[in-house]
Image (cartoon, rainbow, N blue to C red):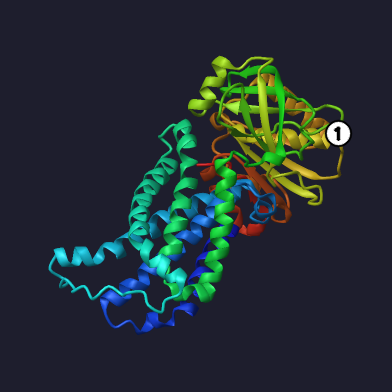
Amino acid sequence: MRTISKVFVGFVLAVTGIWLVSNPDLFAASSFISLRHFMVQYSGFLAISMMSLILLLSVRPVWLTRRLGGLDKAYRQHKWLGIAVLVVATLHWAWRMAPKWGVALGLLERGRRGPRPDGAGLHWAQSLFNEQRGLAETVGEWAFYVAVALILIALIKRIPYRWFARTHTVLAVIYLVLVYHSIVLLDFTNWATPVGYVLAVMLLVGTVSSIIVLFGQIGAGRRSTGEVIEVDYLPEMKSLQIAIRSDGGWKGHLAGQFAFVRFGNSNEAHPFTIASAWRDGVPGLTIIAKKLGDYTNTLYETLKPGDRVALEGPYGTFVLDREKLHQIWISGGIGLTPFVAWLEDLVANPAKLEIDFYQVAPHCDPELMARINDLAGRAGVRLREWRDARDGFLTGEKIRSDVAHWQEAQVWFCGPRQFGEDVKNDLVAAGLHSYAFHQELFDFR
């Protein structure tokens, strides 16, 4: 979370600093109307800059997601930028509408329109932009209304995922409309300042990303196909264990990574953590899908061996670290999937690590638990099966009392977000360095 906050705040401060350096007259504004002009320009510049970064993140560039701490962190950044855009774009609209509201409320006098400039002596581009102002303002306003609706659909989790998936792509079209809006309505003098240079780069990056989105080319270089070879229902966990055989295009993965998977004729690709280690000569992977939403619910009724599978990946940086000698693993519920892959990897490629694994769940299927026990024993991992009804809720205090030298350990957590935050806060407050706690943020909405 610290990286996400730093990138978010750093980006906003950088964009704001560029704006202030290029527009020092803001501080000399002597009237509400002149201040309003600067604020409309600044809020529009900030909003379209953040939207450009959102579009870049949406195409899942591996070089960028690695620096953010993994695709899960990149999508969390994507989400918070979306919320920020909603706020800033609303302020942009409010500043633009403020004179009308002020006149209607009697707070401002209706200004007299001066003579329309004839355009003599203007740069040809400035003349062209002036002719387009009315259209740019109109399409920008309607694009704002549509964007607000689409962002709310993305944020409200009660709205089915399939609606979100189908409507979210439309934001790429809205972005292109707002590119036109931004080019025409930016103060022409700003194009020769750092604001203009930065905006040109951001709009180019966002436009290319939008085209990639609209033509369905996200992750095109990381795609492969396969088929389902086995489906096992795990009733205690209300989950499906799905074995997939690759047609040969899947080039391997690190234990703990995840893939976007699309089954059968579905148009929706969903992220699933890979619950198996990669083995040369065995072109396949296993995922565990928990019954959580409208999409995964249908898998229980429709998925069967022989069904075709489309894969994209692998992604993620929540992978086994063989350099940290003392580790604590904590899984909550379905969060055990990356650790199963880690255990397999340790069995296949042993390492001298001291590991305490807290496998926390209300229940776990006997067959899966037997497999985890077997893998843990062969890997030399101290497995602690933690059941809430029997052991109470797992806390950082209990971990500190169980594990010797816990301050020197690296802690890896995958499970419910609040559970992880509670454990982290306790351990950090008691002396664990915050950078030693690694948490998978597997939430893409």
- The foreground one among 410 and 344 is 344
Q: Position of residue 227 (x, y in %)?
A: 71, 21
Q: Is residue 41 left or right of residue 442?
A: left
* Left or right relative to 341: residue 193: left
Specify the quadrant of the image occupied by residue 30. Answer: bottom left
Mark 1, residue position: 348
Amino acid type of the residue that numbered disc 1 sits on in the rendered structure: Ala
Disc 1 secondary structure class: helix
Q: Quadrant of the N terminus?
A: bottom right
Q: Furthest residue to the left?
A: 106
Q: How many numbered callouts?
A: 1
What is the quadrant of residue 320 in the picture?
Answer: top right
Asked if 46 appears above or below 297 in the picture, the reply is below
Can you give x and y, in whole percent of width and height, for residue 98 in the image? 25, 65
Q: Is residue 432 visible?
A: no
Is 331 above or below relative to 145? above
Residue 183 screen position, x and y as percent? 46, 63
Bin the neighbour count of mark 1 within 10 Å (Cα to Cα): few under 14, some 14-19, many 20 and up.
Answer: some
Residue 155 appears anywhere in the view: yes
In the rendered view, tell whether residue 398 sits above or below residue 226.
Answer: below
Which residue is depicted at the point 30% across and 64% down?
96
Of 419 and 442, the residue lying toward us: 442
Question: Residue 209 appears at what percent x and percent y?
Answer: 58, 50
Q: Residue at x 64, y 27 (%)?
A: 288
Kindly identify the residue that appears in the image at 87 percent across and 28 percent down. Answer: 281
